[in-house]
Amino acid sequence: MSIADKSTAKPRKLGLKERYAHLTRGLGWETTYQPMSKVFPFTDYEGIKIHDWDKWQDPFRLTMDSYWKFQAEKERKLYAVIDSFAQNNGHLNITDARYVNAIKLFLTGVSPLEYSAHRGYAHVGRHFVGAGPRIACQMQAIDELRHAQTQIHTISHYNKFFDGLHDARHMHDHVWYLSVPKSFFEDACSAGPFEFLTAISFSFEYVLTSLLFVPFMSGAAYNGDMATVTFGFSAQSDEARHMTLGLEIIKFMLEQDEGNVPIVQRWIDKWFWRGYRLLTIVAMMMDYMLPKRVMSWAEAWEIYFEQGGGALFEDLSRYGIRMPKYHEVASKEKGRLSHEVWATFYNYTQATAFHTWIPEKDELDWLSAKYPETFDQLYRPRFEYWKEQSDQGKRFYNNVLPQLCVTCQIPMIFTEPDDPKTICFRSTLYKGERYHFCSDGCKDIFLYEPEKYIQSWLPVHQIYQGNCGGATVPEVLNWYHMSLGNDNMDYQGSPDETLWNEWTADRHKSAI
Amino acid sequence: MAEPPAEQPGVPDINKRWVRVTGTHGDFVLFDFTIGDPDLTVELILPFPAFLEFCATNHAPATVEPAAQAAYERLHRRSWTIPLPQRRPGGASDRLL
Amino acid sequence: MPVASIGPYQFESRDKVSNFHGNQLTYLHWEEHNMYCAALAYPLPPTMPFRAIVENLLPEAYGYHPEWAKVKWDQVTWMLDGRPFIPNLDASLAENGLGHKSVVRFWTPGLHGIGGTAT
């Protein structure tokens, strides 16, 4: 990040260091009319002890005025590029219309999280006692709002041509599979400020986000979606700052008091597992939704978590922090995750705002090659059977709603860590009522704070309670704001496919 | 090899694109991709054959960071044994490669 | 552990049985047939005979599967909430010990999914 300040040439202006001091630390003070504990009521109750807020290191030394200037200039270029792509019909350069389904999932599942992150950082940016972390959080709050805006702006172009993109905000708050990302962020935002930063800044941004952004942006670029690559421009340079905030807050807590270590470790365990479960949709995007593949989910997990994350936790071990609990389960699942999830959405595409399909033969071959130990043994026969049935006009749909995990809210589709043929069932009794989980990781999270998760708004149960517009598929889809027969069902025979084939035929004609 | 231009006013030209290899990882190339303006840069990763295809498709000249040079050349040599990606019939990618 | 909070923090279950209009939730799962990606969730009256599960619900849900017609019902083994279980078809769900959010898993010997892949 270039914030080099040339103002030293003008002696009447403040030096960089002084200006930084005034615009950050200078904005905080010891209150006198009211006790500090009343002005900052959320800093103590999580049990984190901070003895000296001035020990907070801000590696970027960015002040709000330079942030504003720098981002405004970047944004100006960014929007110019976004408009150029729209004017040049950028949507025609993508590899295949099936690709747009990844964008649909991104806009409904991920972009609203940027907005939630904005709210979360604005909140904690008010509640830290130290001015250093407060300013860092406020800047990130603006970053996240900008990300949400650029993503919506970029994707609005696709909304002119493709189905399923017309009401992302409403869908995020209502649709069954979107309760997974929604509840993830609400869990974080309803925690205290220190847990929020551990959850989002550290576990998500620092440990897991490269799994989302680098392979996803690479997939977009390789599949000709330069419009989406533009929001990568916006996000990635901010991301470096966000990741640094994530690491700083962890080190700050760990250095301030030894008693903080077990609390932080528990949060890391919880938020690693929650983040990992959230990334199942990324696994599916990478292995199934990109017409031209970048890397398999298993490869991404190895590069970005097993190697990258392994080094990070080795570094943190000097504070007494170990690898997140159940990381080895995530590694055992890496050969199955994307297949189990794609099959799930194939089961229930009658209720999704994007299409699914059976991969074509060369794509199945790619999966067989990337997953030599699992794909032919477990999943390929399933997809081939479905294909055979579909070719005979008997496309499979699962007509009964699935059991959901109370914690991550994903259908209970995951298999036993050591037995990929058997669904993993975990449960517990709390105050006389049964609760079900997809994994030991999700069960542990519940057991630590059951009062939080007994409030889970589980979409399947909400439908059965009569809270989702009715008891039939058309009624529920109407309540989701999905257009039956357009947004949902198989890609084959969809309006998206018809339109894309027309465009392709036109282009071949005009090429001749 | 062309370098990204220095700061320029006005609208970035989306047809001007550059690639800068920053490292490798197994068969993958790590690189920065720029459209029109150095501020508009994103970090990407692609398998080596896909990387070559990507540069060609985007008419993006590539430079290699000195620290990545040796590893990149190793990948380049090894790539004789890597088959080129399958083309999809009828897809837009056909005419691009 | 209680939730770390700034005030009293106690809530009712959002899925308590009284929210289901006289029904209770039941989850059914045919083991080794993961083409159906997860156990199936049903709101069912506790007075319903277990036979209705076997004769109505399961065939409707799983009838599409090529192995469904081959199920030998006298050989099926059952599990209720993690314990071996022999259902009494003519008794009600409640009399069979099914409560709110009970899980019923069943195995069909000799049938291991398409190509033996638990599909």
Image (spheres, coloured by chain):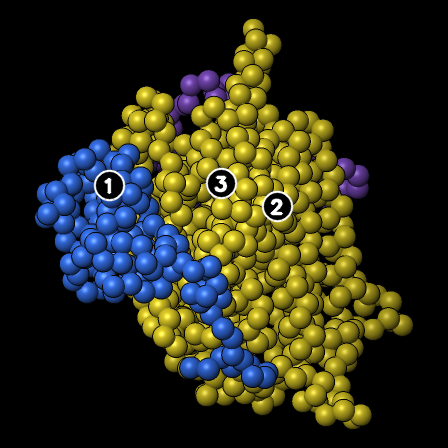
Pointer 2 chain: A
Image vertical order of residue A384 relative to residue C72, above or below: above
Residue A505 horizontal side relative to residue A356, left or right: right
Q: Is residue B65 visible?
A: no
Residue A130 horizontal side relative to residue B74, left or right: right
In the picture, which chain is yellow?
A
Residue A437 x, y percent position in the rendering? 35, 63
Chain C palette colour: blue
Q: Which residue is mark 3?
A: A473
Q: Residue at x 41, y 71 (%)?
A: A446
Residue sticking out furthest to the top: A512
The quarter holding residue A5 reads bottom right
Q: Residues within 10 Å of mark 2 (few under 14, many from 20)?
A: many
Q: Amino acid at mark 1?
A: Thr
Q: Residues within 10 Å of mark 1 (few under 14, many from 20)?
A: many
Q: Which residue is mark 1?
A: C119
Comparing labels 1 and 3, the label whose residue is closer to the camera = 3
Q: Residue at x 57, y 27 (%)?
A: A93
